[in-house]
Amino acid sequence: MTAFREPLSSVNEAIGETPLVRVHASPDAAPVYAKLESFNPGASIKDRIGKYMLERLLERGDIDPGGTVIEPTAGNTGIGIAVAAGRLDLEAVFVVPERFSVEKQQLMRALGAEVINTPSEEGMGYAIERAHALAEELDNAIVPEQFSNPLNAEAHYETTAPEIDAALDGEVGAVVVGCGTGGTLMGLAEYFLERDPNTHIVAVEPEGSAYREFFGEDVPHEAYKTEGIGTHDIETNDLFDSDLVDEIATIPDRDTHEEMSRLAAEEGHLVASSSAANSVAAREIADRIDRGDLAVPHDTVVTVFPDSSERYLSKGVYRDYEEWEG
């Protein structure tokens, strides 16, 4: 079933209005609901920011039609921007660290974008620097910069959050979302805290990530397999506002891997590691609410499942844990 009852003139119009589905392993008294973002035409939540950011940048005159958008990205943002750019008369170039999903990079190229790889060991910080250097070499070029652009969070404040709010009649007690750029969580947090300042906000990261440094913790930086959330350099995450976050849930890769398999086998969700980490954290929050250990304005937990597992099959996400490639 589709949320769209009339024919659409462009694939961009199909972005958003994704289903909100119960995670059945959560307690009946404190259900978890997940926004299934693989239903977007580019198959991830990043379609939202691709469309929203480019439309606003064009409206403001930051770039003119026929220009070039250059973005450092691990993949899904590139796909989302490429989907939107092709319909907005913009060229797209993406700077991608080598280790990230081959499937995503193939899809970006299929959508007409140019992909430039950077060494994995240099991290996303180097990819950001390379993108800005390329933009300076071109006329009518811009780096939307999902890691620091407020339009990233604004996209979720204006689209994702109201959809959740309407589906649950405003009864949202906790928001539990993974942090990569921080855009999704910040947009949802701002929206729901405006409606009830007691809404419990939880950031999700993999074990080995450094988001807890925002709270003054000394965190050992370690490799992790969970893709799309987490950071080893909080200096690149300008959007994250610790004042909006009540706690950070740190999820071990092994727990995430088990939940990926469980969600598929038991609930029919073919989702990737960031979704599984969100699910683990959201279920833990729901269990605390159910036990009476966490007070929230409504006994309902919301999260997002950002994309599907199909883009990660080459990394062995459904094989044994030891075979799963980060």
Image (cartoon, helix red, strand yellow):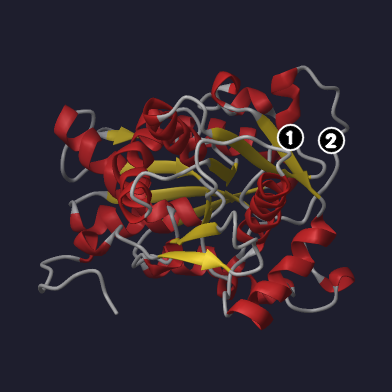
Left or right: 283 in relation to 298: right
Residue under circle 2? 221
* Residue 298 visible in the current orientation: yes
Residue under circle 1? 232
Residue at horizontal 60 percent and vertical 63 percent from the top:
28
Q: Is the Cβ of the residue at disc 2 closer than 8 Å to that at disc 1?
A: yes
Image quarter of the C terminus:
bottom right
- Most foreground residue, 225 or 124: 225
| Element carrying mark 2 | loop
- Most foreground residue, 220 or 68: 220
Q: Quadrant of residue 126?
A: top right
Task: Give the percent coordinates (x, y) of residue 66.
Answer: 18, 46
Task: Give the percent coordinates (x, y) of residue 75.
Answer: 52, 56
Left or right: 168 in relation to 285: left
Q: How many marks?
A: 2
Distance from disc 2 to disc 1, alpha carbons, whole Å, reads: 6 Å
Task: Give the percent coordinates (x, y) of residue 131.
Answer: 48, 37
